[in-house]
Amino acid sequence: MKWGLRLFGCFDIITFLLFVKAKTLYLLTAFGEMQFYIPQKAIAIWEIIVLLSFLLSGILLFQQKKSGLIFSCIQIPFRFIYLYFSVDVFSYLAYYLGFKFEISTANFQNNWFYLLLLLEVMRYSLSAYWYNKLNQQ
């Protein structure tokens, strides 16, 4: 349980680091150009807030606090809406290790999405189990 929470915390921090630059540039673009409408600006701000909550939950999970698990559970709908999966780190790892051609095929990407979805559900199942275990102590 101890190392699992730290691993999930590291995944959340890495997810934050992978997406924060692109989303910050999108936010600056949304406010810098006149063609973006108010709903698009609100969505851009909301995505940055969600990413910052990933950083907060990652730090709290790394410190093995129950509040990190609570933040993680609050983020479940936003992770599925914005497709920010903690285990998506593996696809970036494969990309940077040189498997660009293998992971760019349509068949792989279709199957990979369902695998990521399954792994994310398993992650939350483990998180719920560990949360119950922490409450019993």
Image (tube, rainbow, N blue to C red):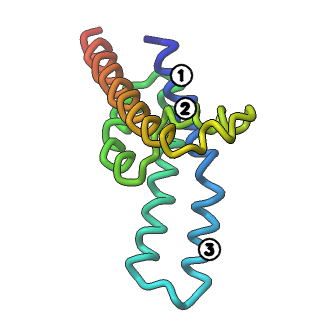
Q: Earlier in the sequence, mark 3 or mark 1?
A: 1
State the residue at coordinates (50%, 51%). 51
Of residues 63 and 1, the one drawn nearer to the viewer in this rendering: 1
Amino acid identity at mark 2: Phe
**Separation of marks 2 and 3 at Cα, in angstroms:** 26 Å
- Residue 76 vs 20, above or below: the answer is above
**Separation of marks 1 and 2 at Cα, in angstroms:** 6 Å
Q: Earlier in the sequence, mark 2 or mark 3?
A: 2
Residue bearing mark 2: 11
Q: Residue furthest bottom?
A: 34
Would you say the residues marked 2 and 3 are in contact, meaning their CB atoms lie under 8 Å apart? no
State the residue at coordinates (42%, 68%). 43
Crowd band around label 1 with a 10 angstrom C-alpha radius: few (<14), some (14–19), many (20+): some
Of residues 103 and 55, the one drawn nearer to the viewer in this rendering: 103
Residue 7 % position (x, y): 53, 22
Residue bearing mark 1: 7
State the residue at coordinates (41%, 82%). 38
Q: Quadrant of the N terminus?
A: top left
Crowd band around label 2 with a 10 angstrom C-alpha radius: few (<14), some (14–19), many (20+): many
Name the mark on residue 68. Answer: none
Report the number of discs: 3
Q: Quadrant of residue 72?
A: top left
Amino acid identity at mark 3: Leu
Q: At numbered mark 1, what does the secondary structure look like: helix, strand or loop?
A: helix
Q: At numbered mark 3, what does the secondary structure look like: helix, strand or loop?
A: helix
Would you say the residues marked 1 and 2 are in contact, meaning their CB atoms lie under 8 Å apart? yes
**Separation of marks 3 and 1 at Cα, in angstroms:** 32 Å
Would you say the residues marked 3 and 1 are in contact, meaning their CB atoms lie under 8 Å apart? no
Name the mark on residue 28. Answer: 3
Residue 76 % position (x, y): 33, 41
Horizontal arrangement in the rendering, residue 25 relative to residue 71 (left or right): right
Horizontal arrangement in the rendering, residue 130 relative to residue 83 (left or right): left
